[in-house]
Amino acid sequence: MIRFDIRFRLAVALLLLGCLTPITMWAEEAPGVRLLHSRMAAALASLPAQTHLLLEQQSIEQFLVELDGAPPDWATVYGQGHHDPGHDERLFALNRERDARREGKAPLQWLIAFVWLGELSGFDEQEGGFRVVLGPKFNQTAWGEVRFKHENLPSTLIALAGQETAKLRARIQQGAPAPVAVLITGRLIPEESLMYDFSHEAEGMGLIMPVVRVESVDFVLEGGQERQP
């Protein structure tokens, strides 16, 4: 009788473990399923109070000043371009030097928020929302182009549109685009932080890529955004 009781309890424990496993897997994807805001102000209001907003040229430039002081001499680093035998070494030296000088600076620990470009795609019946496709946003600054690089982004992004779902589904079915701003929040990865390179679109133009470990994402329907100071 005692042996049967032990076997019964073991079977129940294994059954419960099996039931909990899908819940854990779902929870890992949950951060990518978010409400679709109609205004940027609503998305920003949901962020922690200490978040540094890097949405405009001025705030991005000030962030770079806090980290690295001043822009590099891009013309000297570029030299005669990619075919210049010293080009790669100068770029490598620039990154190595600035990585060392940046160590321990407070902005490496800041919670920051930036924007990538997005668009609503097909409708996910299971989640009841729209899949979101992403594309980088290139920010023009006095330092060169700035393109935030994300790490650890949820593999699936779903925007829940609520009462606007039917209207947006009809819009997408008619072939009209439904652009969204994807507000990404996270912290710099200290060992990578900023990567200096050159633009592939404009010869000699500097490209800076802050490397951010993502903590949350939010979606804002384009056309409902307000300009932030």
Image (cartoon, rainbow, N blue to C red):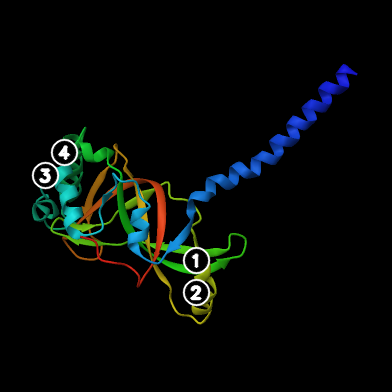
Q: Earlier in the sequence, mark 3 or mark 4?
A: 3
* Amino acid type assigned to the residue bearing label 4 in the image: Glu
Q: Earlier in the sequence, mark 2 or mark 3?
A: 3
Q: How far is the residue under mark 3 from the one under mark 4?
A: 13 Å
Q: How far is the residue under mark 4 from the one under mark 1?
A: 46 Å
Q: Which residue is mark 4?
A: 97
- Residue 178 lies left or right of residue 70; in this view the side is right
16 or 211, which lies in front? 16
Quarter of the image with the N terminus in it: top right
Q: Which residue is mark 1?
A: 161
- Residue 219 lies left or right of residue 158; in this view the side is left
Q: Earlier in the sequence, mark 4 or mark 2?
A: 4
Q: Which residue is mark 2?
A: 168
Q: Residue at x 39, y 47 (%)?
A: 214
196 or 8, which lies in front? 8
Instruction: Judge the density around disc 4: few (<14), some (14-19), many (≥20) Cα neighbours within 10 Å.
Output: few
